[in-house]
Image (spheres, rainbow, N blue to C red):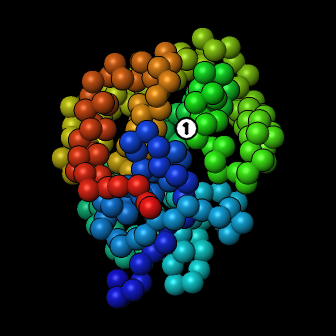
Amino acid sequence: MAGGDVIILHQGPAAWGIANIGPFCVKLESYLRMTGVPYTARIADLGKAPKRKIPFIEEDGKFLGDSQLIIQHLKTKHGDTLDAKLRPKDVAQGHLVRRLLEESLYFHILYERWARDDGWRLYKSIILPLFPPLIGPVAAPMVRRKVIQALDAQGLGRHQPAEVLEMGQEDISAVSTVLGDKPFLLGDHPTSFDASLYAILASIIAFPVDSPFRQFTRAQENLVQYVDRFQQRFFSSWSPPA
């Protein structure tokens, strides 16, 4: 990139020893660190978010939202150093795993943080400072109700807790089996799909409420080792934005 052309990454705050409370923010920052594309991180102003969600980036005076669309844009503009040599079969496998992570396990993360009372008690303490003073105690429960309604609309929120846990365990078991003893999802070298895998797993493991779902995930040794390995390789020099 030309001198001074540094991407501004707009996202949520860091917490629990990982780069962000938002899994998709972790995903995008992971991709940026994996590729070495220069960036600077800022706490997002949702009023500027082009898709009304985080993360989003600012580049050349323009805003772009959605983590996957941003990654596709970065590949086109800055080169595809991670996936260019993948076989079509590998791309297809990575795509399927990414969709499982982002369209199923992500909602289990929401369920753990917003729908479970013990998860909400902790998560509320993280998000309250994001609201203007005096507004948070009123706004946060309203947002919680909307998220629970979204879980109901998606389907996961309509099930009993034991059923939700079983579904989440099946997903985690599938991911653990696909990963096996490989260093990264598709083999010896990281790909863009690892950004999603790390983001979802780290978001589950790092959240410090010891629920049955978190316990089950932590019991999969290869997944825990994967998260540790990824963090040591790509986030060893990371520190939260000032």
Q: Looking at the figure, which quarter contains the N terminus?
A: bottom left
Judging depth in this view, the residue of 190 and 26 nearest the camera is 26
Judging depth in this view, the residue of 5 and 184 nearest the camera is 5
Query: What amino acid is labelled 1 in the image?
Result: Tyr
Q: Residue at x 23, y 41 (%)?
A: 229
Pointer 1 residue: 106
Tell me where residue 225 appears, x and y as whole percent.
25, 32
Tell me where residue 55 appears, x and y as whole percent.
56, 59
Q: Is residue 29 above or below residue 217?
A: below
In the picture, measured across the screen, residue 160 lies left or right of residue 100, that is right
In the picture, measured across the screen, residue 146 lies left or right of residue 60, that is right
Judging depth in this view, the residue of 97 and 131 nearest the camera is 131
Tell me where residue 133 appears, x and y as whole percent.
73, 51
Task: Let me know if residue 145 appears in the view.
Answer: yes
Helix, strand or loop at label 1? It is: helix
Q: Residue at x 63, y 43 (%)?
A: 127
Q: Looking at the figure, which quarter contains the C terminus?
A: bottom left
Q: Is residue 214 above or below residue 178?
A: above
Tell me where residue 88 appears, x and y as whole percent.
35, 54
Q: Residue at x 40, y 24 (%)?
A: 217
